[in-house]
Image (cartoon, rainbow, N blue to C red):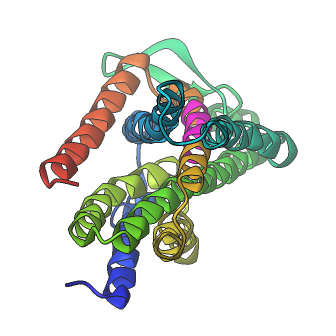
């Protein structure tokens, strides 16, 4: 029999398994193609999470509306609140990040890369159209300050993008924590334990998605920043477990899931836009395929476990 304090400990473990995927951020000396492939895997994982999040949010919303039309409970007001939570959360998660970017990331656009006509090892060479050619610059006696400035802009963008992904996943994990806590308080101890195991294994892959934009930077991210990303992405699982064990609300569950879904849609589009400039479309699609497979396999493990 699991007591309340064990629930809180296990709920925190389920959230902080996200740290297992975060060490990817310290990879250095990574080529553009490899970085693009790693980012594409992260995109695939995020796309899977989008599908998973919206399916879990829409199911209780649609069920409540169907029940109203069938003359059963819940009331029409509860169904309307569920719909409002669904679309309101989507607006907050998606349009809220649009506002964030327009205000705080407007001057930090991702670096632009273009493919030239030269080939390296049978593949098109990918170059930054604003990144100076240092061999040419050296020949004409021009410094490389422009290249260093562009590199700084790119790395600043990568840090902000990782933070946005962590925030979006944090909303997702908060709703998972709510599910754990509400299962416990309703007396379904076995289900709560299975959810902890399932969400814990799934969160490890989410750390990979957060770390994706930080791979291959010229300077390793500081440990405290990686810890902050893990706390933002995984900590809400514990917070949701606490709140869910004290207060049951279907509306809150739908709201935070839809916020997470909207945020993940936004950051996935940003990562895809950057990825197209880092690697060829073939490499990008292969990486997304691998990421989707990772997401579905981990979800299958959760399903087989009965969660």
Horizontal and vertical percent for residue 60?
Answer: 46, 40
Image quadrant holding the C terminus, namely bottom left
* Residue 150 lies in quadrant: top right
Residue placed at 71% from the left, 37% from the top?
91
User: Residue 108: in sight, yes or no?
Assistant: no
Q: Is residue 260 above or below residue 72?
A: below
Q: From the viewer's perspective, is 219 left or right of 130? A: left
Q: From the viewer's perspective, is 75 left or right of 184? A: right
Q: Main secondary structure of the magenta part?
A: helix
User: Residue 253: in sight, yes or no?
Assistant: yes
* Residue 177 lies in quadrant: bottom left
Residue placed at 67% from the left, 41% from the top?
77
Image quadrant holding the N terminus, namely bottom left
Q: Is residue 32 above or below residue 210?
A: above
Horizontal and vertical percent for residue 89?
Answer: 66, 43
Observer-nearest of 261 and 65: 65
Horizontal and vertical percent for residue 20?
Answer: 33, 66
Which region is colored magenta? 260-270
Residue placed at 31% from the left, 25% from the top?
286
Horizontal and vertical percent for residue 112?
Answer: 66, 28
């Amino acid at each position: 029999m699991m007591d309340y304090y064990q629930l809180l400990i296990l709920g925190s473990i389920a959230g902080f398994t996200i740290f297992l995927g975060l060490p990817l951020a310290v990879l250095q000396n990574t080529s553009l193609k490899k970085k693009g492939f790693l980012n594409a895997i992260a995109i695939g994982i995020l796309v899977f999470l989008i599908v998973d999040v919206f399916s879990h949010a829409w199911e209780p919303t649609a069920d409540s509306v169907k029940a109203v039309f069938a003359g059963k409970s819940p009331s029409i007001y509860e169904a309307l609140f569920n719909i409002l939570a669904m679309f309101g959360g989507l607006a907050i998660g998606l349009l809220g990040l649009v506002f964030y970017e327009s205000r705080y990331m407007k001057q930090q656009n991702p670096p632009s890369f273009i493919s030239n006509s030269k080939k390296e090892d049978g593949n098109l060479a990918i170059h930054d159209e604003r990144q100076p050619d240092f061999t040419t610059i050296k020949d004409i006696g021009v410094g490389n300050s422009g290249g260093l400035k562009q590199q700084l802009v790119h790395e600043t963008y990568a840090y902000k993008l990782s933070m946005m992904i962590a925030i979006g996943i944090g909303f997702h994990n908060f709703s998972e924590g709510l599910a754990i806590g509400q299962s416990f308080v309703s007396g379904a101890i076995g289900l709560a334990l299975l959810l902890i195991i399932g969400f814990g294994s799934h969160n490890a892959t989410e750390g990979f998605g957060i770390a994706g934009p930080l791979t291959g930077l010229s300077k390793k991210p500081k440990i405290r920043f990686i810890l902050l990303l893990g706390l933002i992405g995984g900590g809400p699982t514990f917070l949701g477990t606490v709140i869910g064990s004290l207060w049951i609300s279907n509306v809150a569950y739908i709201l935070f899931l839809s916020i997470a879904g909207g945020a993940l849609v936004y950051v996935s589009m940003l990562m895809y836009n950057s990825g197209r400039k880092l690697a060829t479309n073939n490499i990008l699609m292969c990486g997304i395929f691998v990421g989707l497979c990772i997401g579905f396999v981990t979800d299958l493990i959760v399903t087989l476990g009965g969660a």
